[in-house]
Image (tube, rainbow, N blue to C red):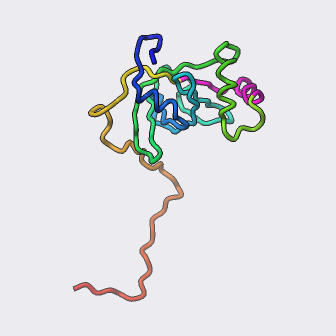
Amino acid sequence: MTDEDGWNSTPLVDEVIKKAAVAWVSAGGPAVALWCAPLEGALVVVSGPGEQAAPGLADATQAQVTMRGDHGGRIVTWPARVTRVRPGTEDWETLAPLVAAKRLNATGPAAELVRRWADEGCALNRLTPAGEPLAGDALPTGSLAEPPRESLAVRATRRPFRLHRVRRR
């Protein structure tokens, strides 16, 4: 697929977009797992009040998208151009109902969901491939896992009870 900048998407990126249900998206911060809908060679993500939280994505112009397989392993990471679709535009009128129809566990019909998204200021973003996917040496070698957050719920673990003392020689 070729976008307006003349960049040709790779077959791997095209294929993972077609099969996507969840994508790990980073818009300047840590990557978060987001529900997405594949449409026209791009991923469409809804975030905002009453929907999923996507920190920084509503105002971003670029993001990193990581697609994972059924067992959690990374398939591909690619840069994306983020385009916000605004209520009242022609794109909104075509995309929002399609995304609402694919929305699982939605309360009410799709038309009501689209109206709620517009009224509550939810962000409907299109993530379009915008460069070569990261591969080989460009992929991070670490786990990319975030360290656990500080919490008051954490306490020191007690030593286990022993009925008798074990002697060591």
Quarter holding residue 115: top right
Residue 152 pos. (x, y %): 53, 55
Quarter holding residue 94: top right
Residue 155 pos. (x, y %): 48, 62
Residue 137 pos. (x, y %): 26, 33
Residue at point 28% right, 34% down? Answer: 136
Residue at point 52% right, 34% down? Answer: 19
Q: Is residue 31 left or right of residue 58?
A: left
Residue at the outermost bottom position: 164
Residue at point 45% right, 48% down? Answer: 71
Q: Is residue 94 above or below residue 140?
A: above
Q: How many labels does the image show?
A: 0
Q: What stretch is highlighted in magenta?
A: 111-126
Q: Quadrant of the C terminus?
A: bottom left
Quarter holding residue 133: top left
Q: Main secondary structure of the magenta part?
A: helix
Q: Is residue 17 above or below residue 82?
A: below
